[in-house]
Image (tube, coloured by chain):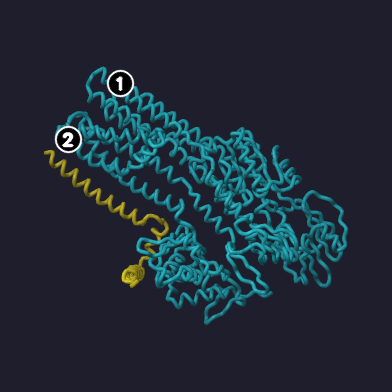
Amino acid sequence: MSSWVIGMMLGVSVFLGSIALVALMWAIKKGQFDDKEKFLNAALYDDEEELNDAVKMEAKRKEALRKKEYRPE
Amino acid sequence: MKLSKKVKCDHCHLEFSEDVMIEDDGHYFCCNGCQGVYHLLSEQGLDGFYKKLGDEHLAPPSNQFEDASNFDTPAFYEQYVKQTKDGFSEVSLIIEGIHCAACVWLNEKALTNMDGVIATNINYTNNKAKIVWDDENVKLSQIIEMIRAIGYNAYPYDASLQEEKANKERKEYYLRMAVAIFATMNMMTIMVAQYAGYFSGISADIKHILNIGEWVLATPVLFYSGWPFFKGMYYGIKTKTVNMDTLVATGSMLTYLYSIYITLTRSGEAYFDSVTMIVTFVLVGKFLEVLSKKSVADTLDVMNKYLPHDVKVLDGEKVFTKNVNDVAVGEVVLVNAGDKVALDGEVIDGSGTFDESSLTGESEPIFKTVGDTIISGTVSIDADVKYKVSKDYAHSTMSNIVSLLENAMNNKPRLQQLANRLSEYFSSVILLLAAFTFIGWYFYSSDFEQSFMIAISVIVIACPCALALATPVATLVGLSIASKKGILFKEAAQLETMSQADVLVLDKTGTITQGKPHVVKEKIYKDFDISLLYSLLLNSKHPIAKAVADYVYDENLHCLELESYNNVASAGITAMYHGKMLAGGNAKMMKIIGIDVDDKSEDSEFYFAYDGEVLVKYELFDMPREDAKEAIQEIEKLGIEVIMLTGDHQRSAQKVASLVSIKEFISEMTPQDKANYIEKLHKDGKIVVMAGDGVNDILALAESDIAIAMGNGSDIAIEVSDIVLLNDTFGSLYDSFTISRKTFSMIKQNLGLSLVYNGITIPLAMAGYIIPLIAAISMSISSLLVVGNSLRIKIGYKD
C-alpha cells in the first residue's frame, strides 16, 4: 500500500469525524442540551403549531427591530 | 352531613363534593380563580393545555398578589432588567406553580402570543424563565400579569450573578472536552499503527504521515482544550506561584514543540499522544470539580423570596400597599393572621400570638399586645395588629440578618485541598528535576538533542494525570454513596473539609429535637367523650393544641357542633356545647374558669375541663430525635467535640442535653451570638461543623466550615448549608462523618499511589530509559489504579 492512500484515508476520516464534532459543538453552544427535561419532552410538543409560533416570533422580532431602526428622533 | 358526589374541577383537576362547586355551563370549578383561568384560556385559544395536562393536578390560582406596577419602577429595572444587543429588554424570572411539561407549554405559549414579547425560554427542570421583550410595545408588569392571569406567579431573580457564570463555565468545559475526547479517540487508533510499527518495523514514510496526522489532532487539543491550563499558568506567574497548571502547560507545550521538531526532521519518536492524553485526563479531572461547585447566587434568591416586599400601610382610614423600602419610621402598618412581619415596630392596637422561632428558636408562640415590640422576620399566628414602625427596612432585624448572611457567605473559610497543596510542591520539584536532567545529560554527552529529549520525557512521565484524578474520582464515589444514604453534599471539596472537623455544633430545637411538642404523659381524671376534646382542639392553631389533637386522633371521632369559641390569649380556648362550657389550655386557663390545679411540671401542660371539672391532663415535651443519643455518642467516639447551642432558656436546654448526653451546651443565645461563638472556635484553630434547621441558625451555618441542614428545615437553612440530611436522622449525621473520613483516606491513598508511581518512573526517565510507549502505558495504568482504588470506598457501604 502506498503511503498516500494512508494519508488520504486518515485525512478523510478525521475530516468526517470533525464535521460531527462541529455539529455537536454547535448544538451545545445553542443550548440544546441545557435542559434535560425539555430535550426529552420536545417530541411531545413539537408540532406544526410550534413551528408556526417560532416563525411568527422571528417575524415579530424583525418587525420590532425594523421599527427601532427607522424611528425618527 | 350527607355525603355528596365528588366532582373534578375543570381547571385544577382537584376533587371536591358537588355542592361546593361553582357550576358554569356544564363545567365545574372549585373557585373563582380556576373559573377565570379556564375562560381566559378558552378565549385565547389555549385550551389545548387541558389535553396536554392529562390527569395532572394543579394548584388553584391565588388572587393575592403584590401590585404588579412595582415591576415597572426604574429601581426594579436597574436591578433585574438587562438590555440585549438589539436594544430589547431581558429579565430572568422564577415561575411558581409549574408542575409538569404542559404548564411550561402553556406559559411559553401564552407569552409567545403576547404583543412585543420577542423570545421566551422556560427551563423545565428549575422553572427559571428568560424573557426578552420590546419595552416600547409591552411592559414587564403586563407580562407578569399575564403569567398570573393563567394561574401562575412569577418573581424576578438576578441572573447576572454566579449562577449564570457557573453555567457558562460548565458549557465551555463541555466544548473543550468534546474536542479533547474526539481527538484522543482518533489518536488512539493511529497509535495502534504506530506501536505495531515500533515492534514489527514500519516504513519511514508511513510513520511520517501518521506523525503529521497526530500533529493535526493534537493542535486543537493543546490550544483549545488546554487553554484553561495556559490561563492558570499565567495567573500563577502573576502571583508568583507554581501550580498544577504550570506543570501541565509547560509539559504539554514542550512535548508538543519537541514532537513537531521530531516530525519535521524525521528523527526519533513523537510524543503527540502524550500531549492529548495529558490534556484530556487533567481536563476531565478539572471538569468533575467544576461540576460539583455550588453557587451563592441561588441562596440569595431564596432569601429575597422569603422576605415580604410589600406591607399594608394605614393612612387615616385608608389602607394601601407600599413597598417596604418606602415605609418611613412612624408610619402605621397592618399585620393580619398568617402575615410575615417586614419591619420592626411597636404594637399600637390589637393583640395576638407571634411565631418567633425563626429568630429565637423558641418553639412556644409569644403573645404580644399594645406596647410590645414586634420584630421583622417573625410570623403572626393569629394576631391582627396595627403597629408603628420604629426602624426603616434597611435597619430592621431581618434585613440586618440578610446583609450579615451575605457577608458571611462571601467570607466562608475554605481549606485548601490536599491535592492542590501537594501539586504546588510537586510541580516545582518536577520542573527543577527536568532542568537538572537536561544540564546533567548535556555535560555528560554534549548532545543537545538527546539531553532535551530526556528532559522532556521526565516532564511527560511526571505529568500529573493520576494526581489530577486522585481527588475528583474519590470524592465522586464518596458523594454517590452519601446520596444513596440520603446525605447530599453540595460541593465535593466539602468531603475533605468535613473529614478534618474537630467540633460539631448542634442547634437544639428542630435539630436534636423534633421541633414540635409531643404528648409524653397523659393523666385521665375521669372518663369522657374524646370527640368533645377533639372538636375543641380543631379550632386552635397553637402547636400544643395541634400536638394534643394528633395524639388523641382516631378514626371513630366525630366533629361536634360547638358554639361561641373564644381564644384566650396565652391561656387556651373555651367553647360551649349544649349550654355547658368546654375549656382547654394551661394552668392559667383553668384558673380563669375557676378551677385550681396545683400539679407542677417542668413541661408544657394542657388541661381539658368540661362543665367546671378537669377531665384530663397532658404533659408535652419537644422530644429529641430517636437515634440522637446513640449517634452523638458514636460521633464523640470519632474524637469530635459535640456542643449544643440554643436560643431556648437554660432549663429546657439542660433537660435535652442530659437526654442525649451532651456535656457542653450554651443556652439563651441570639442568632448573632451563635455566629460569634463559631467565630471564636475558628480563632482557636478548630474546624467547625454546624448542624441546624431554622432561620435563627443561618448566620452560624454560614460562619461554620461545614454547615449541615436537616431536610425538613427551613428553605434558607438548606440553601446556606453544604450538606443536607434528607432523611432527618442523626444516623446519617454520623454516616456523613464516616463517609467523608473514608473518602479522604482514599484521596490520600490515591495521591500516595501516584507519587509512588512517579518515584519509580522519574528516575527511569532521568536515566533515559523511557520510550513513548512506556510513557503512554504507565500514564494509563496509573490513572486506572487511581480510579479502581477509589471504588474501594464502596466496600462496607453495601445497600
Q: Left or right? Give the position of B359 relative to B535.
A: left
Q: In the rendered view of the protein, which quadrant contains the N terminus of chain B?
A: bottom right
Marks 1/2 in contact by CB < 8 Å: the verdict is no
Res A6 visible: yes
User: Residue B208: which numbered mark, if any?
Assistant: 2
Give the crowd class for mark 1: few <14, some 14-19, many >=20 residues within 10 Å. Answer: some
Please give the count of numbered marks on the rendered protein. 2
Q: x, y percentage for residue B575?
A: 79, 68
- In this rendering, position of residue B652 left or right of residue B399: right
Q: In the figure, what tint was chain B given?
A: cyan
Alpha-carbon span between mark 1 and mark 2: 28 Å
Q: Measuring 77% from the left and 72% from the top, which residue is drawn there?
A: B563
Answer few, some or many: residues within 10 Å of disc 2's Cα (few below 14, many 20 plus, some between 14 and 19).
many
**Measured along the vertical axis of the image, is residue B423 above or below residue B71?**
above
Residue at 25 percent of width and 42 percent of height: B217
Residue sitting farthest toward the left: A2
Query: Which residue occupies the foreground of this view, A72 or B496?
Result: A72
Q: Toward the viewer: A55 or B439?
A: B439
Q: Nearer the viewer, residue B602 or B536?
A: B602
> Vertically, is B317 above or below B626?
below
The three-letter amino acid code for the residue at tag 1 is Ala
Q: Is residue B113 visible?
A: no
What tint does the image give chain A? yellow
Find residue B269 and report its horizontal and vertical position in percent: 22, 30
Residue A44 vs B649, above or below: the answer is below
Q: Disc 1 marks which residue? A: B767
- Circle 1 SS class: loop
Which chain contains the residue that carries disc 1? B
